Amino acid sequence: MIDESDEGGERDRTDPDHPIVDRPWEYDIVEFSYNAKSLNDRHHYIDLTLRRGPVDESLLRYFWRELRFLGPRDLRIEGDFPASSGGLRILDVRGRQLDGLGVWVVDSEQGHGSVTFWAREVIDLGAIKPRYKRGDRVVLAGERTDWIAGGKATITRRGQLRNIFDGTPHIEYVVEFDEPMLDPTDGDHYSGSNAIERDLLPWIEEVDTSGSSTSPAE
């Protein structure tokens, strides 16, 4: 538990609103999930789905936001949740230079149903979109994967959101290698593999006067 007397349990007027959501107090928390599967509590995370609206009662149109908070600490949920007093705030507390904490979720109304906690960082899940599509040509970045650096491949399955280790979301693809590649971990050759987006670079084919050549995009 955080010692609020040492780390500023009362909101500091210099704490700015985090830019990830504009006017969060206009949203309701409609889904709350705490993932504690890892034995390391630094790898736990909280997913919040927020809803604002309806903006058009005849169409029941809503605005939705899906947020992930990494490394949550000192979670407190008041009675009557999920009904709340409507004072949700997401504050950027990096300026306090707290150990491993950069976000503070608070309720400015401090009323019924409030949810408060600290976290290392917050990620907008709705903003994570696949960079590549099926059929795109890519090159493997050797410094971030077990496969041979510079190996060429083709995306064969659209990217899907996956969680890696500490809850950090990544886009994962299935790729087919141009030539079977050796996996140094088991000594076998494979025609394809799963690959996460950070391990891939776009492959751009170029043609010059001396003939056809290919090179990865920087």
Image: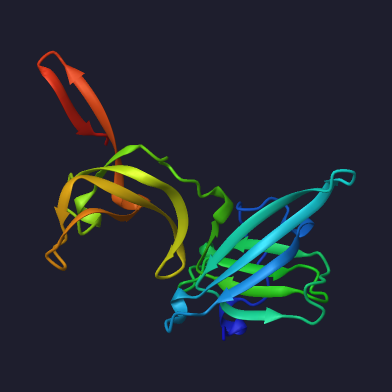
Kindly tell me whether residue 39 is visible in this rendering: yes
* Residue at the image point whose x is 46% and y is 53% from the top: 160
* Residue at the image point whose x is 25% and y is 56% from the top: 144
Position of 150 with respect to 127 (left or right) is: left
Query: Vertically, is 125 above or below 103?
Result: above
Position of 163 with respect to 150 (left or right) is: right
Query: Vertically, is 117 above or below 163?
Result: below
Kindly tell me whether residue 17 is visible in this rendering: no
User: In the image shown, does 130 or 115 lie closer to the viewer?
Assistant: 130
Residue 99 percent location from the top left of the image? 46, 74
Q: Quadrant of the N terminus?
A: bottom right
User: In the image shown, does 206 or 108 lie closer to the viewer?
Assistant: 206
Residue at the limit of the structure toward the top, as seen here: 209
Q: Quadrant of the C terminus?
A: top left
* Residue at the image point whose x is 73% and y is 53% from the top: 23
Position of 65 with respect to 164 (left or right) is: right
Colouring of the image: rainbow
Residue 36 percent location from the top left of the image? 51, 80
The picture quadrant where one finds residue 134 is top left
Number of marks in the rendered image: 0
* Residue at the image point whose x is 70% and y is 53% from the top: 64
Query: Vertically, is 38 above or below 60?
Result: below
The picture quadrant where one finds residue 118 is bottom right
Residue 138 percent location from the top left of the image? 29, 40
User: In the image shown, does 171 or 178 lie closer to the viewer?
Assistant: 178
Residue 89 percent location from the top left of the image? 70, 63
